[in-house]
Image: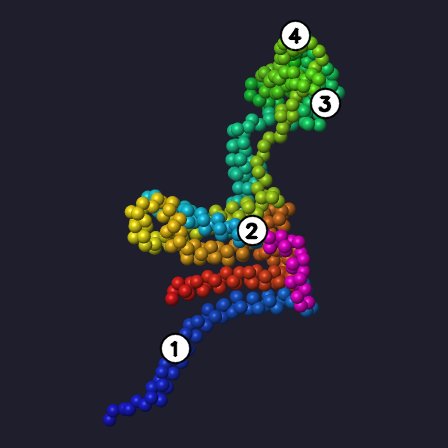
């Protein structure tokens, strides 16, 4: 006999099969769901609840932590800096990634170029922070960026040879308010003047400096004013202050001015023995001046980690790490573009800029949006680079929401209630961007 299958038994079999599939799905998904609950859902709910209690966690304070959060100047500065990060970093990264992705299509060694740019992604934020902390060092002997800045500056503008030089008290030279040194006694044509300075180490004298004794004893003609600028210090000791001794060196490359009635009547530069000479001076009294440019401190570069530049400096380190990521993602989208449209535009006479602006960018808009939103989510959570690169004295100038949350909770504030409120604020700001990305991903899959 043939078994007769009734509709009720078929429906029961389908329900049984569906139930088995659900059981199997739950068994496989359970470990992931447990981890998600323990590592994400529970901490999130706990933080939301903790944000309504005081620092000790024993007294319910309602929304006081949220009110205090927007009254605290440090938190407001963190919100401002986070806004700068969101506006600047994703925009620059998306633009750089797009440009590099387009350019790498034009070179034979594109794979090697992409590999080099993507390598920083393999470096941890901790290591990258240490690298850039050293690169941003203000001392040119340690910081590579300031070494380059000083090298470029000194190429176009000569550095002072005597930044530490000074005059002895009561030895005929006095320092003016503008940093120059001037003679206290007036002089004139037919005389030879010795101007002694100290504060310069003998081993730091310019190459070619020779003793100044002979120049100090030279006689001046009736219409000229002669003199010598020398180091009033005898190596090994001895000698007499205010007089040029046999072993005392001249100071070459020193600018000297003869001033009469407040106006510069002549300029000269000292020779290797420190001597200078003003010829054909009109009769009268003159004041000799060593301009401040002789004693200007050397250019030491840019204060990258000072209050004004610390946030752009940290953003620069972030760009170094993530440019390869943006380039690779946009490059993948670029490789999927229909080549027929590009070739048709070229055949119609469009140049490369027109093709890029009117065809490439519009077709890449979905990819660019995903990259931009992903980077926005990432920069909202940036912590490591800011904490490592920004020195302690300017940490508050560079702080963002993530670092402020840590500082308030564990870095000295010890107020987990306020820190939890900051964490909730960060969650509220990140969630919309995440939902936008998820929704866009689902639309692309449908």
Q: Earlier in the sequence, mark 3 or mark 2?
A: 2
Question: What's the CA distance linking mark 2 and mark 1?
Answer: 49 Å
- Which element carries disc 1, helix, strand or loop? helix
Comparing labels 3 and 4, the label whose residue is closer to the camera: 4
Q: Which residue is mark 1?
A: 21
Q: Earlier in the sequence, mark 1 or mark 4?
A: 1
Q: Is residue 151 magenta?
A: no
- Which element carries disc 4, helix, strand or loop? loop
Q: Which residue is mark 3?
A: 174
Mark 3 in CB contact with mark 2 (< 8 angstroms): no
Question: What's the CA distance linking mark 4 and mark 2?
Answer: 67 Å
Comparing labels 2 and 1, the label whose residue is closer to the camera: 2
x%, y% of residue 406?
60, 57
| 442 shown above or below 257 | below
Q: Earlier in the sequence, mark 2 or mark 1?
A: 1
Question: What's the CA distance linking mark 3 and mark 2?
Answer: 50 Å
x%, y% of residue 298?
60, 30
- Which element carries disc 2, helix, strand or loop? helix
Q: Which residue is mark 4?
A: 223
In the displayed orientation, state which residue is furthest to the front.
348
């Amino acid at each position: 006999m043939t078994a007769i299958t009734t509709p009720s038994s078929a429906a029961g079999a389908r329900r049984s099969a569906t139930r088995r599939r659900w059981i199997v799905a739950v068994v496989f998904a359970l470990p992931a769901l447990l981890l998600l609950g323990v590592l994400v859902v529970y901490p999130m709910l706990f933080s939301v609840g903790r944000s309504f209690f005081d620092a000790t966690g024993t007294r319910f304070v309602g929304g006081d932590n949220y009110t205090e959060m927007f009254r605290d100047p440090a938190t407001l500065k963190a919100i401002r800096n986070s806004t700068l990060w969101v506006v600047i970093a994703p925009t620059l990264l998306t633009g750089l990634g797009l440009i590099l992705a387009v350019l790498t299509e034009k070179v034979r060694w594109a794979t090697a170029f992409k590999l080099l740019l993507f390598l920083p992604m393999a470096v941890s934020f901790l290591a990258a922070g240490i690298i850039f902390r050293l690169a941003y060092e203000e001392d040119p002997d340690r910081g590579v960026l300031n070494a380059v800045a000083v090298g470029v500056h000194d190429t176009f503008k000569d550095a002072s040879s005597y930044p530490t030089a000074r005059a002895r008290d009561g030895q005929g030279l006095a320092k003016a308010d503008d940093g120059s040194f001037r003679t206290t006694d007036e002089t004139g044509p037919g005389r030879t003047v010795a101007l002694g300075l100290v504060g310069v180490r003998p081993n730091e004298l310019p190459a070619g400096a020779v003793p100044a004794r002979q120049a100090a004893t030279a006689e001046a003609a009736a219409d000229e004013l002669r003199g010598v600028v020398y180091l009033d210090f005898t190596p090994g000791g001895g000698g007499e202050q205010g007089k040029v001794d046999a072993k005392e060196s001249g100071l070459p490359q020193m600018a000297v001015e003869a001033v009469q009635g407040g106006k510069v009547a002549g300029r000269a530069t000292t020779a290797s023995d420190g001597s200078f000479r003003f010829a054909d001076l009109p009769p009268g009294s003159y004041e000799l001046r060593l301009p401040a440019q002789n004693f200007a401190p050397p250019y030491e570069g840019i204060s990258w980690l000072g209050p004004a530049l610390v946030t752009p400096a940290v953003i620069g380190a972030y760009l170094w790490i993530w440019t390869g990521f943006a380039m690779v993602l946009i490059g993948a989208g670029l490789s999927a573009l229909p080549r027929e449209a590009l070739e048709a535009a070229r055949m119609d006479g469009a140049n490369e800029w027109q093709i890029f602006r009117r065809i490439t960018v519009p077709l890449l808009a979905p990819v660019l949006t995903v990259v931009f939103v992903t980077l926005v989510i990432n920069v909202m959570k940036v912590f490591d680079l800011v904490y490592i690169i920004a020195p302690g004295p300017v940490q508050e100038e560079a702080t963002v929401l993530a670092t402020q949350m840590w500082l308030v909770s564990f870095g000295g504030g010890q107020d987990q209630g306020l820190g939890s409120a900051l964490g909730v604020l960060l969650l509220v700001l990140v969630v919309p961007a995440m939902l936008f990305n998820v929704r866009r991903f689902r639309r692309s899959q449908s």
